[in-house]
C-alpha cells in the first residue's frame, strides 16, 4: 500500500460529515434496494456513493441499531418515525462489495427482515452488497453456466455424512470423457461450505472466466473446514483466527489459538485428504494427481491451506492463501516444490503490506510466487472474489 | 377423514390445559434443541410430546410473541425474566414435522436468531422440526447419497438465467451410459426452488428409498414456479392459492385468483416445458420421453401441475397433486391417458375428505389413480414428505 492508498483508506474512516465537507457533495438521493434483499423488500437500500439506508418496522420498540457502519463506532442508530418505522443512513459510504450485518432491537440481536441471510460469524447474518466498480467479473451473465452441487460424502473419522459443494464447469455433463483438475477452496472462520458460492460467487467468477477464454475449466470443491461435531448443545466451537489476518468484523477474538491443533487435532486434515479427496476422485471426472490438484482458502481457510499443504506436500501442487498469511522459504525448503504459491490481501488489511515482500522472497529462492492486493477492500468478500479471479488463470498451467 | 380422525383433529385444537386435564399428564421436561437450530444455539427446544419452548434475548423489549402455537389464536406470548430473556412454551403440542414461524418483537416481525431459516410465505422464515414417529424415511443415514445440484438455465421467455436444483441419484456419476426418468417437482405458494430439498428432504427420501431397493433411481428437478420478474421494488407478486387447498398458515389470502392466468399468463408453462425440460434433457442423462417424465407439486405447485399436465398431456406421463386439488374424469377425457394420477392431502386439511372419492371416480373410468392421506398432518411439509415417499415407488413402472 503506497502513501496515496493509505490516505484514501484513512479518508474512508472519517465520518460522513467530514467527508461531505471535504467533497462538498451531499448524500445522493439515488437509493435503490440492495441486490441481496429478500423478494419484494424495498429496504435496505444503497446509493451510488455506497451509503446504506435502513427501514425497520418495530412500532413498539424503543431502540434499533444496525451493526453496519463505520468501523468500531457502534454502527448506525436508527430513528423512529410516526408510523412505527425506524430509519437511518450510514454515516459514511461503505467499502464496495459484500458486508455482513445485524440489528440490535431493544437489546436483542436479530436479522434485518428485508435482507437475505449469509452464514458468517457462526450464525446466519443479514448481508448487503455495495455495487463494485468492477462487479462485471462476478455478474450473472448470459454465458454457459456450470453447476454447483451438494454432495454428502461419508466420513469415517467423524462418523457422519458431511456436506460439500462441487462446482463443475459448463460442458461437464456433455463430454463424458474429459477429466478436470480440482481446486479445494476453504471458507473463513465463522463461515461454512456455503460461503464461496453465496457470498463469493465462485461459480459465476468461473463461468465468466471460462466464457472469456481466460482459463481452462476446472472443478472447485468447497466443504466445511472444521470437525468439531458442531451440534446444538455441544458448547462453543473453537474460534481460531485467520493466520496473519485481522479478525472478521464483529467476530469474537479467539484465545490460545493453535493452527496445528485446530487443523490436525480436530481432524480436518483427515477429512479433507483421506476422505473428501478420494471421494471426489472416485465420483467426479478428475485428473487425480498432484499437478492437477490445488488448495486455497480465505482467512482461517488460508491457515488450513498453509498447514495442510506443508504437512501433505505430495497431495496438492498449487497453494493459495487469501487474507490467510504467507509462506516462507524456510517452510517450503526441502519439501516437494509447489507449482505456484499465491498470496493475497485486501489493501485495508495491515498484513497487505507484507505480501509483496513475501512473494519477492519466495521468487528469489526460485519459487513461482504471486502476490495480489485488492484495492480499497478489507477482510471481506470483495477481496476474496478478486483474489479468486486473479488466481484461477494461474492454476494448472 | 372418518369420524375418529375428525375427533382427533378437533382434540388437537383444544388448549394445552384441557389436553393436560384429559391426559392427566404434565408437560415433560425432556426438552432438547430443535434439529433445525443454528450452530451452538440451545433454543428453540422441543420435547417428546411436541411442545416447543422458546428463549429470546431482548433485554429492553416490552413484548415478544411467537407465531407458532395453536392455530388462529395468536401464537405464543413469551414472558420476560430478570436476565432479559423472553421465554415461553407452546400451549399445546405441535403436529409432527416441519413448521414455519416468526417472532413479533415490540410490534416488528423478525426471525428467531436461534433457528435456521427456510423460504416460505414469500420470506425467509424461522423453521422448527417436531420429530415425527416415522422420521426414519427422511433421515440422513449411512447410505449412498445422491447429489443436489444448482443449475442456471437460460430462459429466453423471461430474459434471464433461472435457477433450478437437480437431484441425481447415487451412482449417477459412475455409470456414464445409464439414463434416468425425471420427476419435475414444484413448491408451494410463497416458497421457492429451495423448498423440496431444505424443508422436504426430497434428496434423503430418495436416497433411502433407493438404498432399501424400493424404487429404481430417477432424477428430480425443482425450479421456481413463477415468472413475475420478482425483483425488489417491482411490487407484490401475484398470490395464487393452491387449487382446492387451504392457504398456508399466515399467508395472505389472494383475491381474484385464476390458475390459468397465473401459470400460462405469467409464463411458467413456457419456462418449464419449452426451456427447462429441453435444457435438462440436453445436460443430464435423461430418458427424454413422456413415459419417463413426471410432474408433481405441492399446494400451488399442484395447481400448476394440474394445469400444465392437462394443457400439455404429451409432455408428462405421470401426474401428482400434493395438497393441490384433484383431477376429474371430465378433464382427462379425450386426452392422452396419464400412466398414473396421484393425489394426496394431510388428514387435517378439509380437502382430504375428497381425495379418496376423486381417485375412486378416476379408477372407475379406467385410470390408474392413487389417493394418499397423511395421518394427523395439515397443509405442511410432513404431509408432502410422506406423499413423495408414497409416490416415488409408483413412478416409471
Image (spheres, coloured by chain):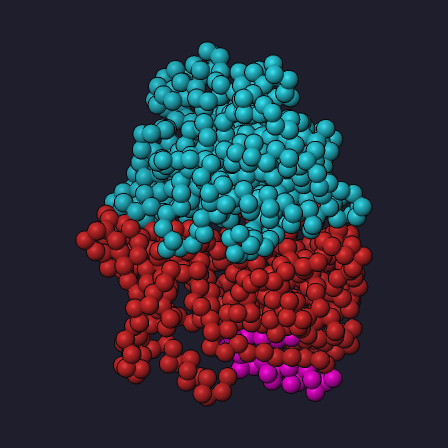
Chain colours: A cyan, B red
Which picture quadrant has residue A82?
top left
Q: Is A122 displayed left or right of A59 in the figure?
A: right
- Against A267, residue B218 (above or below) is below
At a point 54% along the width and 42% down the height, the residue shown is: A269
Q: Is residue B37 magenta?
A: no
Q: Is B65 displayed left or right of A130 in the figure?
A: left
At a point 31% along the width and 72% down the height, the residue shown is: B28
At a point 80% along the width and 46% down the height, the residue shown is: A177
* Front one among B78 and A234: A234
Magenta-drawn segment: B342-366
Q: Is residue A252 visible?
A: yes
- Against B212, residue A269 (above or below) is above
Q: Where is residue B32 drawn, in percent x and y? A: 36, 63
* Front one among B295 and A288: A288
Q: Where is residue A275 drawn, in percent x and y? A: 60, 48
Q: Is A103 displayed left or right of A351 in the figure?
A: left
- Against B278, residue B185 (above or below) is below
Q: Where is residue A235 drawn, in percent x and y? A: 36, 51
At a point 71% along the width and 75% down the height, the residue shown is: B340
* Front one among A46 and A358: A358
- The number of numbered discs placed on residues in the rendered structure image is 0
Q: Is residue A144 visible?
A: no
Q: Is residue B350 magenta?
A: yes
Quarter of the rendering occupied by the C terminus of chain B: bottom right
Q: Where is residue A160 drawn, in percent x and y? A: 53, 56
Which picture quadrant has residue A273?
top right
Amino acid at each position: 500500500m503506497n502513501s496515496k492508498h493509505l490516505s484514501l483508506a484513512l479518508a474512508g474512516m472519517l465520518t460522513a460529515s467530514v467527508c461531505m465537507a471535504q467533497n462538498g457533495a451531499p448524500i445522493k438521493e439515488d437509493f435503490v434496494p440492495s441486490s441481496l434483499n429478500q423478494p419484494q423488500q424495498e429496504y435496505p437500500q444503497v446509493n451510488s456513493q455506497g451509503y446504506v439506508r435502513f427501514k425497520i418496522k418495530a412500532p413498539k420498540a424503543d431502540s434499533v441499531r444496525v451493526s453496519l457502519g463505520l468501523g468500531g463506532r457502534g454502527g448506525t442508530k436508527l430513528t423512529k418515525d410516526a408510523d412505527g418505522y425506524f430509519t437511518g443512513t450510514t454515516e459514511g459510504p461503505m467499502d464496495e462489495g459484500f458486508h455482513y450485518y445485524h440489528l440490535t432491537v431493544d437489546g436483542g440481536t436479530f436479522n434485518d427482515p428485508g435482507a437475505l441471510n449469509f452464514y458468517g460469524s457462526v450464525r446466519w447474518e443479514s448481508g448487503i452488497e455495495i455495487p463494485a466498480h468492477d462487479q462485471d467479473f462476478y455478474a450473472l451473465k448470459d454465458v454457459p453456466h456450470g453447476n454447483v452441487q451438494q454432495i454428502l460424502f461419508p466420513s469415517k473419522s467423524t462418523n457422519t455424512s458431511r456436506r460439500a459443494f462441487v462446482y463443475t464447469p459448463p460442458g461437464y455433463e456433455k463430454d463424458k470423457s474429459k477429466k478436470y483438475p480440482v481446486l479445494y477452496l476453504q471458507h473463513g472462520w465463522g463461515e461454512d461450505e456455503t460461503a464461496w458460492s453465496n457470498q463469493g460467487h465462485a461459480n459465476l467468477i468461473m463461468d465468466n472466466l471460462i466464457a472469456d477464454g481466460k482459463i481452462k475449466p476446472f472443478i472447485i470443491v468447497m466443504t466445511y473446514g472444521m470437525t468439531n461435531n458442531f451440534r446444538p448443545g455441544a458448547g462453543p466451537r473453537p474460534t481460531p483466527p485467520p493466520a496473519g489476518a485481522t479478525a472478521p468484523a464483529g467476530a469474537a477474538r479467539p484465545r490460545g489459538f493453535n493452527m496445528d491443533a485446530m487443523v490436525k487435532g480436530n481432524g480436518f486434515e483427515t477429512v479433507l485428504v483421506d476422505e473428501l479427496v478420494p471421494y471426489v476422485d472416485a465420483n467426479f471426472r478428475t485428473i487425480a494427481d498432484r499437478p492437477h490438484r490445488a488448495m486455497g482458502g480465505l482467512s482461517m481457510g488460508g491457515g488450513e491451506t498453509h498447514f495442510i499443504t506443508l504437512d501433505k506436500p505430495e497431495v496438492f501442487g498449487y497453494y493459495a492463501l487469501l487474507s490467510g498469511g504467507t509462506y516462507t522459504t524456510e517452510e517450503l525448503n526441502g519439501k516437494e516444490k509447489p507449482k505456484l504459491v499465491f498470496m493475497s490481501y485486501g489493501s485495508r488489511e495491515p498484513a497487505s503490506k507484507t505480501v509483496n515482500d513475501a512473494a519477492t522472497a519466495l521468487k528469489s529462492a526460485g519459487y513461482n510466487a504471486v502476490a495480489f492486493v485488492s484495492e480499497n477492500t478489507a477482510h471481506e468478500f470483495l477481496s476474496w472474489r478478486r483474489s479468486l479471479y486473479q488466481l484461477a488463470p494461474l492454476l494448472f498451467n
